[in-house]
Amino acid sequence: MDFQSDSDTVFIFDNNNKHKYYLVNTGSIYYDSLLIMPARGAAVQVVGVSGKTRFFMSYTYQSLSGYQQVLKNTGDYFPLSTVNGNNFYTITASTTTDQVVAKFAQMAGTYLDPYLHDIFVYDGDNINTATQIGSLDEVGSTITVSAGRSISLVNLYNSGPSVTAYFLGNDASTVQGYSKYSVILATNQSRISGTLSDLTDFGAAYTFICLDCSNYYWASMNFDELATIADKGFISFRGQTPTHQRERLIRYDPLTYTSSYLPQLLPTDVFTLNLYLSRIAFNLTTTSPTWNAPFDGRKGYIFSPNLCTPSANSFNYEFRDDTQLYNYTLNFDKTTYALNTDLITLRIGSGNSTPTLDAQYPRDPITNGKVSATGNYMQIGLAASAGADIRLSFNMAQAITPSVSTTQGPTVQTTTPGGNQPVFTCPTSPITVATGTGNLPSGATNLTVVPAGTNCTFTFDIPNNYAIQLRFSMDFQSDSDTVFIFDNNNKHKYYLVNTGSIYYNSLLIMPARGAAVQVVGVSGKTRFFMSYTYQSLSGYQQVLKNTGEYFPLSTVNGNNFYTITASTATDQVVAKFAQMAGTYLDPYLHDIFVYDGDNINTATQIGSLDEVGSTITVSAGRSISLVNLYNSGPSVTAYFLGNDASTVQGYSKYSVILATNQSRISGQLSDLTDFGAAYTFICLNCSTYYWASMNFDDLATIADKGFISFRGQTPTHRREQLIRYNPLTYTSSYLPQLLPTDVFTLNLYLARIAFNLTTTTTTWNAPFDGRKGYIFSPNLWTPSANTFNYEFRDDTQLYNYTLNFDKTTYAVNTDQITLRVGSGNSTPTLDAQYPRDPITNGKVSATGNYMQIGLAASAGADIRLSFNMAQATPPVSTTPGVSTTAGPNVTVSTVQTTTAGGTQHFNRFIIAVLVLLAIL
């Protein structure tokens, strides 16, 4: 294909004559681009307007009879790279009465694997007779239930070696009740963080699969207090996939959960997390330097591994802190020994001396289901048969107050390259702004060895109009050595981890009113150095913005700070960042501090923008302020939008998405709560959107209540909702729909949709039989010129055009609507002006090839029109390869092909280069 004009188009239709794909003008020539369509039919429509575009297509029927079957069961995961060549994979449910739900799995934070589109999903165990229900990128993005006991996968493109994703099929009975279900891959070096949210009565599930490790660590978690239903919400964990139907072993709810429960080890390569009426922020790792570290108030659970995974039923754990005594309590919640040789060992003691407690169970007695003792360490071991069921929990409490000096035994000195010999000692009081700047440990000028047994906390007092710059240098020699950073609330905020490389002068800035750095040494080999500098905020200049205004965060830089103020004195502010659809979270958002007020010298810092902007966080007062103390502004690609809190805080979720004049955004939006969701779309360099296609998910959407609606600008602008679709009345004949604005807000309620949105379209002006739509004066959407000129034309076909005048308010005498309906270059059948000419029953109808509608009006005019199109005569008959000319410079040729087999449904053509929008 060699496009010479955006007016020339190529459409591909499936067997149901449904528009599936289209080729677009990318500025380059397509050569031999492959598209495979399944049984039972397809059509390619070529429309020429310019007379300059060039087209060529070849076709080959491909037999599926030679493909060999590979059998898999639900609950088995496998790499999709193996679905290749002349094989196809059949996944079968575990019982004859169950069905299958297909899911692909990818690493957290990665783009949707484009090669998933190459894998066809058939609803049955034989690709030669079963119906193709879609490509895996589509089928695996929703909870799609097979009709029978099996599904089959085949890659007819032979792109298997390029596929990085994995596959997991589950028994439908174990997942189809959830509002959403996803599968995430991990490796032995994974650190996964983010937010999970489900505020429906159905709950959500997530299966995590580690490809080369056997342990996970649930490292940190916070419930979102604004979103979570406190007395009902929870998160729970169980081993393996939903199909394995293992018992849920751990459950946290917001009324009883505290951070003292974490980190929690999960002894399995695969686990499933269930979320109900909750939103959480979390960190999950497959390596942890802190699992073995005691701390005051710590709690946790220990299970026999067979409860999580079919592995050896044994473990050996040690919790140790040689600088501190702890009262360790082990609770025997359930102990079922299958054989006489099943054994639990427990040792609690200090140093190298004889343990205070050295016991074996069931040999030794247990009082009231628990055992307690004091020491530096607790060692717990299990050697048991597969039938043993062991469930333990533990508590730790600091036995004595640690001394200020953290050096145990002889003082350890290390020689730095500068020749100094500092002793690693801790300050006895907080460091204050009076110090200004300094190095730690005291006297150090370079990396200094952290002696074994060190547990030192450096505490900083930070006045309101200051922040502190901490610069870390770190040479880890062991995963057991740790550095933790705490905020003013003594909340564990960050930690340094062993990456295998040396940190040099890594900058971390902490805001008022305090911070602490805890250094724990176990190996005696790790080296540490930190410098600090107090940074005054008094010289920063204020830039004022209002809610409803968006701006690039790259401008929040240097010595300025931005204050965003609500539109009324009684309102508050919700801060949101905006990014292009399908992009990673901008890491530089973390550099932007959010202060709860209009003065960064007196207001409280409530978090970094990546945290605050990920939830609906309401300011305490009328204003918030943003500052980038790292001066990384030029690197920030995201934008900012603040809204009046009263316009968004009632939603279950709210997001802002950027677009450009070349954007094609495709994905799913879902909200099944009674609160609804909202999404604001901002085009940076265009003034029109096209809502191109949409489908309601029949299984998830509440048919008599759900809807999607559109209004101009941001929620703060409080514009009227102009378009609303509900599943009982919506059909695809309403689309594409033009939205004449650079900014619009979409509201979703009790519905899940799949959609396509573009800022360029070749189909808005194309009539078709049964088409419907809306036309509004632009001032209802945006403060732009209140004019338009639209033409709908098909010179190969006559249509009965009907224009409905739903509302027409003319503000001045010169306000005018023009309407022309006609054919070819002859005099129009209808050539009217309104309000000059009469209208019967609020509508005007005429027949022709085209309909032209224009508006020239003042800002006060309120014009709301809708239209219908109906084919007036049968379409021009065409045969494969035969061109028919209708009017000058217009060529239409249609190629029909029929193949044997079933029916293929909604799909996406990768030539169209659509971007996945993943909004949770």
Image: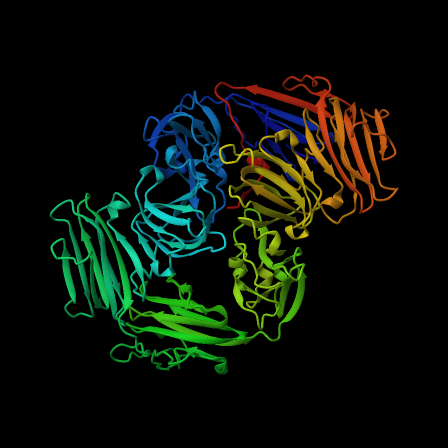
Q: Quadrant of the N terminus?
A: top right
Task: Give 519 or 59, whichever is nearer the viewer.
Answer: 519
Colour scheme of the rendered structure: rainbow
* Residue name at image x 28 percent, y 64 percent: 396
Q: How many marks?
A: 0
397 vs 621, left or right, is: left
Residue 795 in sight here? no
61 vs 189, left or right, is: right
Q: Position of residue 71 (x, y in %)?
A: 34, 29
Q: Position of residue 703 (x, y in %)?
A: 54, 33
Asked if 707 appears above or below 317 in the picture, the reply is above
Q: Position of residue 513 (x, y in %)?
A: 49, 72
Task: Give 426 or 745, whichever is nearer the viewer.
Answer: 745
Hey, which quadrant is residue 847 in on the image? top right
Asked if 672 appears above or below 429 in the picture, the reply is above
Residue 647 in sight here? yes
* Residue name at image x 51 percent, y 41 percent: 672
Q: Position of residue 253 (x, y in %)?
A: 39, 52
Task: Give 746 or 806, whichever is nearer the viewer.
Answer: 806
425 vs 367, left or right, is: right
Asked if 557 appears above or below 887 in the picture, the reply is below
Hey, which quadrant is residue 419 in on the image? bottom left
